[in-house]
Amino acid sequence: MTPLVSILIPAYNAERWIAETMLSALGQTWPNKEIILVDDGSTDQTVRVAQQFACKTVSIVSQKNQGAAAARNKAFSFCSGDYIQWLDADDILAPDKISRQMEFAESCANKRILLSSEWGHFLFRTSRAKFTPTALWDDLPPVEWLRLKMEKNTWMQPDSWLVSRELTEAAGPWDERLSLDDEGEYFCRVLIKSDGVKFIRGAKTFYRMTGPQSLGQVDKSNKKLESAWRSTRLHVQYLRSLEDSARTRRACVTFMQVRVHHFHPHRPDLINTTQRLAKTLGGEVTLEKRVDPLHWKFAWMKEIFGLEFAYLAQNKLPQFKNWALRLWDKAMFQVEKTARS
């Protein structure tokens, strides 16, 4: 029998995007699929829009607002798939994404192989998506994949994965204590239970850049900052469980050096905790060290206004450019949509 693939979608206030996401799920060329959307207490019209797609193979479930991790756990509890495709409510799958990955899965007897794919980010038009390969776009054993992620400060977009039910159950549920980087922590656990990652070239997913309102944005709320710290600590724990060596400890320290800036200046306690953990690994993290070097255009600001102001200016300029690009891409999206209709 053709394996069943469950496409699981957590949604919260996603009425702007959910129709496109549902259409991309329904449009998968893999024939045997089910789609389960769990609405996490949306206050907009997400449910009304999603209900238009309800049918024998599409289920819409609602719950009180409990967070994305809880919505994903509920979706999994309702599914019957042999393979699991997680899909965020504002992202899009290429039509043959699952088929390309399942082609390998059916040829491989090992259900513990974790399947990944190419991913690109876009604003409104998927035709303008940018696909930028990283060190993770390769076939890798678990320890090498996780070490590279932490050492090079890179990541794999969650929609890119296709996971067998066996591997999903071995990893355990999503951690509902996490409100930030829950997907990073979760796929670490999937990874360490796997027999390695198989990167499927040509399989593609599209990650929508929604801007400041994205749930993945780091803000200064205690809940998100504590979640960021918990996820950071668990990343270190997971990598060391695979290999505790000088090179993996260096990767852990590098990873913490990137993340320590999230906690400044609002949570000096988390800064201190991060620094103490780094010392136990034989390294050091400071607020003076930055993985993203200060560009010469902004370096003069350091002497006058201080280092943090210079980095703030350096970070804000791309945000302004992105705002302008977003307006343009949205306008062109509307033009193309009108032309098609």
Image: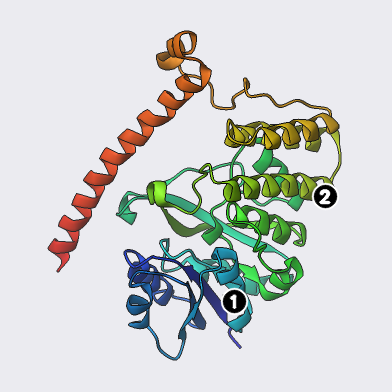
Disc ID at residue 242: 2
Q: Is residue 3 visible?
A: no
Q: Quadrant of residue 171?
A: bottom right
Question: Where residue 119 sits: x, y (%)?
Answer: 48, 53
Q: Quadrant of the N terminus?
A: bottom right
Mark 1 neighbour density, 10 Å: few (under 14) some (14–19) many (20 or more): many
Q: Position of residue 225 (x, y in %)?
A: 60, 45
Residue denoted by label 1: 74
Give the crowd class for mark 2: few <14, some 14-19, many >=20 residues within 10 Å. some
Side of 318 where 341 appears, left or right: left
Between label 2 and label 1, give the one nearer the viewer: 1
Question: Of the residues shown, which amino acid type is indicated by label 1?
Answer: Lys
Q: Is residue 242 above or below residue 39?
A: above
> In this rendering, is residue 72 above or below 278?
below
Residues 80 and 294: in front is: 294
Q: Is residue 286 above or below residue 126?
A: above
Residue nearest the viewer, comparing 221 with 80: 221
Residue 287, how many percent across, how many down?
Answer: 63, 24
Given the image, on which type of amino acid does mark 2 rest? Leu
Query: Which residue is rendered at x = 44% and y = 9% of the image?
Result: 300
From the viewer's perspective, tell me whether residue 277 is left or right of residue 210.
right
Q: Earlier in the sequence, mark 2 or mark 1?
A: 1
Residue located farthest toward the bottom when viewing the structure as drawn: 56
**Looking at the image, can residue 46 be seen?**
yes
Expressed as whole percent of the image width and height from the top left, the position of residue 47 reads 38, 77
Residue 269 as seen in the image, left or right of residue 261: right
